[in-house]
Amino acid sequence: MNTSESTIGIVGAGIGGLVAAIALRRAGHDVVVFEQAKQFARVGADINLTPNAVRALDGLGVGEAARVTAARPSHRISRTYDSGEETSRLEMADSAEQRYGAPQLTIHRADLLAALADMFPAERVALGKRAETIAADDKGVTLSFSDGTSARVGVLIGADGIHSGVRTAMFGAESPRFTGIVAYRAVVPAERVAGVPNLGAFTKWWGPNPQSQIVTFPLNRGKDIFIFATTPQDTWHLESWTAPGSVDELREQYVAYHPEARALLDACDTVLKTALYERDPMPAWAQGRMALLGDAAHPMLPFMAQGAGMAIEDAVVLSRHLDGVAMADIPAALQAYQTARIERASQVQLGSRGNNWLREGGNADWVYGYDAWAVPLGVPAQG
Ligand code: FAD
């Protein structure tokens, strides 16, 4: 893979890294993505993209491809776990489109990654390149990979997720913290649970404590229903998109929930299980010729469904700060990117930890109404 001190290198071909790659290339830069995986695999699960994320993807030109398999939830509903009482209901779909310029979409993560990968030259994605050491100087950054090769770039973006090595190279080692919460993910065919109301909506059942919830929403254009449930459990520490869980355990955890929520769990044949980790907000994301985005900068709990959304926003705003900027001026542009993004992402990171978002109504505009293509450059977002 040819690179030089005129190249922007990105470590990580996840959602954040690929959006950044497409947008930075469009902004006139030579971009190379280094990804540790040997191939793009269909792992993960459904992801909920709120209007702020969809609007950013639309501006990138990927919205149409994303809509091919996505579902478009009709509402965002909050219900109390045992009584079933509805405590808030927000219209999405057309209403969100009118209010925010984009709907909410729910899509398989792999479909979104495939749509993004199609928009970036495959020959500029270096697969099987696990970055091991990263050394920056005044002119650029040198990376060494686990396969014994190395590369030199002018600027390096760390989009390498919650365990980011770029972050460690910039700011020192500090491990993510286990939250004591696990998440179950399952998919059931909609026809199997046809008697359950509101299947076209995003519904969050608020549990007896802030760590316990069941979220359900349509996927695959409504043919299936995705179930995302969390509960406190400090004995399971494995972080994985593919580790199986037990459906019996899943059902036991939520016996106190309303019959309509339990009917969905009863219909599951299989379930996946992962432990949830997070970090505190950082005081800085940019340093010299390197900057972070997405989970590398601000891994958050999934309670506001904003992790991927924030990564997408970061990537778009980063590309706007670097649009047409000469390599010599990039360190200042990276600082301006940090100024524009850090407050908002930290606010969402802390809000996700607090887990109270839209429980009893409230105004969603500050999150859903953000337009990454139009916010002023170098200025903190208005929260
Ligand atoms: P990642 O997706 O983690 O990508 C990082 C990439 O870097 C990977 O491809 C990895 O292989 C690569 N990499 C790592 N280290 C190296 C290295 N040393 N060298 C080379 N490559 C490397 N967000 C939402 O917006 N909506 C949701 O509904 C939602 N649900 C979620 C449910 C769960 C259970 C969890 C855990 C998270 C959820 N999120 C959700 C959060 C979302 O998944 C993440 O915030 C998002 O994927 C972050 O994207 P990223 O590109 O920053 O990092």
Image (cartoon, rainbow, N blue to C red):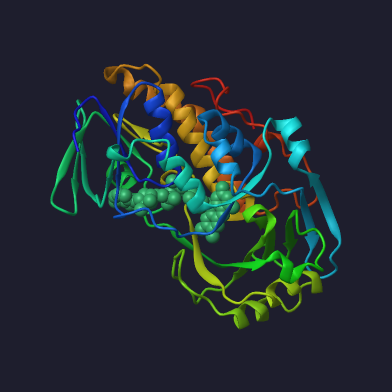
Q: Residue at x 49, y 21 (%)?
A: 378
**In the rendered view, would you say 120 is above or below 89?**
above
Of 15 and 82, nearer the camera is 15
- Residue 342, x across and y down, in percent: 50, 35
Q: Is residue 368 above or below residue 163?
A: above
Q: Is residue 174 left or right of residue 272?
A: left
Query: In this rendering, would 40 be left or right of 202?
Result: left
| Residue 84 appears left or right of 222 | right
Q: Toward which corner of the image does residue 211 lie, by quadrant?
A: bottom right
Residue 28 at least partly seen: yes
The residue located at (31%, 44%) in the rendering is 166
Left or right: 277, with 69 as reference point = left
How many numbered markers are drawn?
0
Residue at 74% x, 62% y is 206
In front of the other: 206 or 263 = 263
Question: x, y percentage for residue 338?
Answer: 44, 30
Q: Quadrant of the C terminus?
A: top right
Residue 212 visible (yes or no) = no
- The image position of residue 224, as x and y in percent, is 66, 62
Image height check: is 124 above or below 4?
below
On the rendered image, what quadrant is the N terminus found in? Answer: top left
* Name of the residue lying farthest toward the left: 148
Image coordinates of residue 322 in percent, x first then y, are: 39, 22
